[in-house]
Image: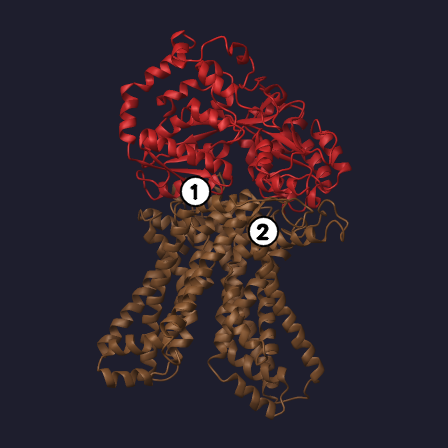
Chain colours: A red, B brown
Amino acid sequence: MTISNKKSALAASFNITRGLLIGFGLCAASFGLSAADQSAATMTASPAWQQTLATAKGQTVYFNAWGGSETINAYIRWAAEQVKSKYQVTVKQVKVTDTANVVSRLLAEKSAGRTSSGSVDMVWINGENFKSMKDNGLLSDPYTQQLPNYLLVDIENKPSTLYDFTTAVDNLEAPWGMAQLVFMYDTAHLDNHPQDMQSLLSTVQSNKGRFSYPAPPNFHGTSFIKQALLELIADKSLLSKAVVKEDFSRVTAPVWAYLDKLHPLMWRSGRSFPSSGGQMKKLLNNSEIFISLTFNPNDASNAIANDELPDSIKTYVHSKGTLGNTHFVAIPFNATAKEGAKVFANFLMSPAAQARKASPQVWGDPTVLAMQKLTKAQRQSFSELPLGQATLSAEQLGTVLLEPHASWVAALEQEWLSRYAK
Amino acid sequence: MRAANYKLILVSLGAAVLFILPVLAGLLGTWLPALGYLPSIGARQISIAPVLAVLSHPSSYSSIQATLSSALLATAGAFFISQWLCMQLYGSDSWSWIKRSIALLLAVPHLAFGIGFAFLISPSGWIMRLLSPDLSGFNVPPDWLIINDSYALSLTLVLILKEVPFFLLMSVAAMGSFDVAKTLQVAASLGYSRSQAWLKLVFVQMYPQLRLPLYAVLSYSLSVVDLSIILGPTAPPTFAVLINQWYGDADTDFRLLGAAGASLLLLMVTVLLGLLFALEKLCCKLFSKWLLAGPKKPVLSPVASVSRGIAKVTLVGLWVSTILALAVLLVWSFARQWRFPSALPSKWSLKYWQLSWQQLGEPLLNTALVGFCSAAIAVSIVVAILHWQSQRNSFVTHGTSSSSQLLLWLIYLPMLVPQVSFLFGIQVLLVGLALEGKLVSLVWAHLIFVLPYCYLTLAKVFLQFDNRFMQQAMILSQSRWKSFWMIKMPMLFTPIAFSFAISFSVSVSQYLATLYVAGGRFDTITTQTVALASGADDRISASFALWQFCLPLLVFVTAIAIPQFCFRRRKGL
């Protein structure tokens, strides 16, 4: 198993340099802080990029993004206003319930021979959907290398920015944010939180009916199954390779044995499942469940600030680490406003946009940027962000476990359905 | 006059071509992938493998089982309850009130009602909050499987609550075609009890006009997606939701499964409608003697008054559940924090109305635009067709000709064919013509579903219009157009306005049609409400659900008010 011991890049070490250097971005750059910084600056002025900016002017970008969270929608609205005033690019969010529907639609367009002026200019994507788009030739040419801000991305310490659920990204999608599986629990009902899958089982044993997870193929549900897989199977090195059909049931047997024990103790005795992570939050708020899960380490803090959750909610991760990944934006093969989409993607990766996104008051989505590649002022905008009241620090978040090879998802979901949804 | 008739025939045929052919093309575009042919994903091998894959999919069996049981139970339940209410309450003091208020119940969209109802009856819902902790003893919500239960009972219940008003309205319309009061009077004088008279004389005359609504409700219940996502079982979901999930799966091979599932669903609907038809015939045979046997000993009156009482309670229950569902939406939309077991929110806020207002501009405009266009076009087409039919009937022969019967079934076809079974094909078709995501295609797609309802609400009124008014007008004015616009239209303006409102609300409630045809370019209030309900911020989804209710309501109120205002000086209109 290729577990990288990478710590989250929101490293605290930068606090030391704070105050020593004068916070002028330009000065910092001229002191030679990083080569990438300078080349980013040069590329901003590069003729090719200037050309892109010029063509993008006046274009309308239809950004297909999951629309189920008002916090995120508000952030996208803000970003759209910014690129409108800075680059005269109009961005319209097409709120989708399931990104796979977008892949569907593109597929329909491809089958109809619509190779240009497609209906989707940009899509928020990762994992299986990305693999599906890549495999079906639904993506435009590699583009992230053209974006000035791509040079600031922490590809060295965040391997998931290069391998999206082990599928090579190949510059086909621009990293937008980081995610890590984090559990939420209600301290009003539980004194201690579980440390791993086994102790989760014993916690649920003494609090019958107070835990659940969304039914796969929901993303959060499948992630929970993958986390169980990572923790429970003997040979973890198998997970970085494609699934071998013949060995599947033998390898995954401990997971199903575990779930067989867990389900009868779960919410609704495992006969019904929440539809999404969002619904889990609602159940947690109503004390229907005491433990929930999320892929955004700041989710709980945001929800508390927003009165969606009570302030008795805290978060935790399992002691041997939890699943983590990156989410991206991609441009389809037949996008109408490719240049506009590039300009927007570049803006989404800019330090200003990333810092705002990382703010717990705004969205609280961890950045994809490398702190050492930023100017001091830019770094400061990250280090000064308050940590939400239920948010774990980078150290507390601990080890990030890489996603298993994408082929495991379908196999796990199929097996799950045939066991628990028949 | 002949020439005018031909023009109208052309118009009607054109309408049929415009609306029936696409349905057929959509079906074909779904059947081909069901047989393994979908070139866009490299599938070119014709085989029944996708169908076999659906049948062997672990979720299919229990999914189909839950779908069948909930659809059959909901359809039968709603039909029987509505007919029983008619029988018990016709002619009572509440009858005229029912007739007037039924449209209001119908104006509450299924989705908004479903979301509100879930807020009401779930273990952490409003009812349980009002009872807790003092009465129920619960400090945390009980772990009861009420919403999303595996037998789809909550879905069935909501379907019944929503379809009873629909059947009531259709029954009221059907009663307009003969004199029910007189029939009952004569029957009573011949010694029939009320219930006997109703079943043997009234219901039998009503049924031919209730057949289509009955079929439509059965088809709808078998294939509903949006309501099922909110209330239906989850592991596995109902079959239509499962099909929709397959269409949307990241693994593109599942498109074939989706298409095969959609075709199977259509087969199920066809077989069930066939069985229902056979059941009708069987009942006709079995009960023909009983129907003609004349009166039997009348039921004692105390029992009758008890059942009338129960009927009234049922009706009140219908109203109370609707009002409470809307009330809980209203409370949630003004809540900031509302945790179990508080009876009311601990913190209130206007924020979510402001938020929804900011986000609503565009979807609201889209919904109104598409609704207005499709309703206006539908009403125009239907008025043209009906006017033509009524002219033919009065000038040629009485009774219904076979050509107009055929036209009727063609118009109603989209009501009977499950949406999910042909929208995928329509999507492929529109994408091929580069018409996907255009306003015109969206209006057209809505029109397919709006038209039948529009026709259903107007047909009776038009065909019963006393043509002597037209003849008189033509003698006086010497102008066909003048007579039509100055006499017939004003006389029928009230039902036309009402039909416009129904058409509008049908358009507003379109979920799948918008999803598949709008290409994401046009969000409507309904697609947004489902999207937000999946994200599950209760406060914002409550305010969206209320908007989904308010828009059609506004149109209903206007449709009732305008004729009253316009004709306030004219007697008898």
Q: Which residue is at a point 51% across and 65% down the rendered structure image?
A: B104
- Identified by mark 1, the residue type is Ser
- Identified by mark 2, the residue type is Val
Residue linked to disc 2 = B331
Determine the image quadrant of residue A134: top left
Report the front residue among B511 and B7: B511
Identify the mark at residue A235; answer none if there is no mark.
none
Report the front residue among B13 and B365: B365
Report x, y in % for residue B530. Answer: 51, 48
Q: Residues within 10 Å of mark 1 (few under 14, many from 20)?
A: many
Identify the mark at residue A104; answer none if there is no mark.
1
Q: Residue furthest bottom?
A: B190
Report the front residue among B177 and A21: A21
Tell which tag, 1 or 2, sits nearer the viewer: 2
Q: Disc 1 is attached to a residue of which chain?
A: A
Q: Residues within 10 Å of mark 2 (few under 14, many from 20)?
A: some
Residue A364 lies, with reference to residue B105, above or below; the image says: above
